Amino acid sequence: MDILELLAKRRSIRRYQTKPVEKEKIIRVLEAARLGPSAANMQPCYFVVVTEKGVRESLKASYNADWFVQAPVIIVGCANPKEAWRRRDGEEYWKVDLAIAMQNLILAAAELGLGTCWIANFDEKAAKRALNVPKEIRVVAMTPLGYPDEEKGLVTDRKPLDKLIHYERW
């Protein structure tokens, strides 16, 4: 599939089939995440793969949505700020690195016919408690992963390109 077709096809899914996701597909989306670029190739990203129902349910304390924990898999994207690159002015890039990795994961999932939904509005402390994440590690994003139980059309609600682009100078 052409990359622009894939990008237009990818949608946030909030209803999942109970069908388990094959381990090979989980590994494939994680491999896509691993292959993402990171600033200075520091690779500060880590992932928690949650498949057990009880552990998925424990994540409700961090994001209270039934559809979220009903997906057969939840992938939690984490980063270690101490392992990430910093620009000279002190700007840290661990969130950017993790965002790129998650985008790769989400696109790989879409290519495999799996649904995802980027989750950022969660209680990080509750997520860390539920998953026993070490103190120095930050939880940045989460996504359910599974076979969609809903149909959505192509992405059409984006700003037109001519409203986003500036040539040479702003």
Image (spheres, rainbow, N blue to C red):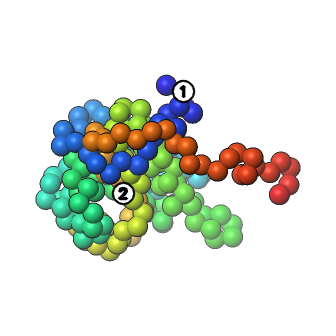
The structure residue drawn at horizontal position 27% and vertical position 67%, both measured from the top left corner, is 64
Q: Secondary structure at mark 2?
A: strand
The structure residue drawn at horizontal position 75% and vertical position 46%, both measured from the top left corner, is 162
* Front residue of this view, candidates 152 and 166: 152
| Quadrant housing the C terminus | bottom right
Task: Tell me if I can see residue 126 in this picture.
Answer: yes
Examine the image and state in which quarter residue 137 appears: bottom left
> On screen, 64 above or below 33?
below
Check disc 2 and give the amino acid type.
Met
> On screen, 166 above or below 136?
above
Which of the numbered marks, if any, corresponds to residue 2?
1
**Badge 2 is on which residue?**
142
**Image location of residue 50, percent across then percent down:** 23, 52
* Front residue of this view, candidates 94 and 65: 65
- Of callouts 1 and 2, the N-terminal one: 1
Check disc 1 and give the amino acid type.
Asp
Q: Secondary structure at mark 1?
A: loop
The structure residue drawn at horizontal position 18% and vertical position 43%, both measured from the top left corner, is 18
Q: CA distance from mark 1 to mark 2?
A: 26 Å
Which of the numbered marks, if any, corresponds to residue 162?
none
Task: Tell me if I can see residue 49 in this picture.
Answer: no
Q: Which residue is most to the top?
A: 1
**Image location of residue 16, percent across then percent down:** 26, 45
**Image location of residue 131, percent across then percent down:** 24, 64
The structure residue drawn at horizontal position 51% and vertical position 49%, both measured from the top left corner, is 100
> On screen, 112 above or below 65?
above
Examine the image and state in which quarter residue 11 appears: top left
Examine the image and state in which quarter residue 156 appears: top right
Q: Which residue is most to the left?
A: 54
**Image location of residue 123, percent across then percent down:** 34, 72
